[in-house]
Image (spheres, helix red, strand yellow):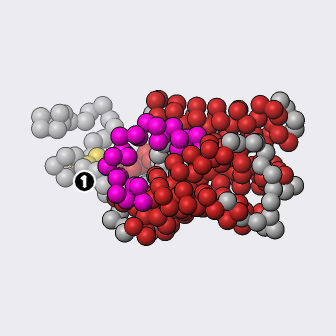
Amino acid sequence: MLEVALAIPYWLELAATIAGAIFGALSAVRAKYDIFGVCCIAIVVGLAGGITRDILLQDYGIYAFQKPNLILACIAAGIVAFYFGKLMTYFDPFMDLLDNLSVALWAIIGTGKALSAGLDLVPAVILGTITANGGGIVRDICMNREPEAFQAGTVYVSAAFIGALAFAVMKQNHLLDQYAAITCVVLVMGIRYASLAFGWRTRPARDYSDVVTQAVAQPVKRMANRVRARRRPTGFQAQTTGLTGPIPPVTAKGVTGSMPPIASPSATGSMAPIASDGSSPDSALGNGVTSTDGENRCYPESDDQPPRPESET
């Protein structure tokens, strides 16, 4: 059997075990269990954490079986809770104190035994946390409900973990190791009561996938837009694109026909309009002008041209 890291008085160890057993028994009473079920749940909550720790340590025996008085104390607590459950609720403040104290003490015992067995810091802290909270987890499993230790709510398991971590660090590195145990107790109880006083609560999972995706996508989009802007035609190329070749027919106020092709900017000389029949611009203008009434009338270029009708002026 491993020696514990802290010499705890037997009466205090017994009180911590009974406190856990009473909490477990009251849970079974509220669930309408019979007396056998209430006593079993009391034993589970009071001792299951230490039993799980001893099973994981291996070859060192199970402490609860070497101290049968602790099992009998859990059974007695279950019987009292079964018949006097309502009376025990009047001692809730005292029971809360014992519960928080028992969590701190079991964290110290579990971590100290793991260090005594030659385990490193990480497994020692894990075993200390399991010892402090394993009873409640096993209780919830036996009662077929979700473990409260794994749900969002008041800070409970985290307090035991922080206390066990502080104890293991101070013990392993010999940093004021004579005060390691009291430091663990102060941390566990301080965090527990502070969480109740200030409303500290753990939160469920929150998904940040969309935030990360948007943060990564925005630089990629900006880079893609820059690449596209570099590939676009600029200035002179953008103006000349699509302006060469024949232009489709244009219809405006009775004037139909297709416009001649527009020469490219590289062509030299001036562009002159060409009539549809192939004649020169001067002959096209001299043949006549189409009026608004549709008649093609010719007006000579001499000075003796007759005056135009008033309807055309």
Q: Left or right: 63 with respect to 287?
A: right
Q: Is residue 87 found inside the magenta-colored segment of the image?
A: yes
Give the quadrant of residue 138: bottom right
Q: Left or right: 27 with respect to 128?
A: left
Number of on-image labels:
1
Q: Nearer the viewer, residue 82 or 147?
A: 82
> Does the rendering let one see residue 191?
yes
Q: Residue at x 17, y 38 (%)?
A: 312
Q: Left or right: 242 with respect to 179?
A: left
The residue at which mark 1 appears reads as 254
Magenta residues, start to end:
79-102
Give the quadrant of residue 91: top left
- Note whether 45 is above or below 301 in the view shown: below
> Does the rendering let one see residue 146?
no
Q: Residue at x 46, y 34 (%)?
A: 196
Q: Residue at x 47, y 46 (%)?
A: 153
Q: Position of residue 225 (x, y in %)?
A: 61, 46
Q: Residue at x 12, y 38 (%)?
A: 311
Q: Position of residue 158 (x, y in %)?
A: 60, 44
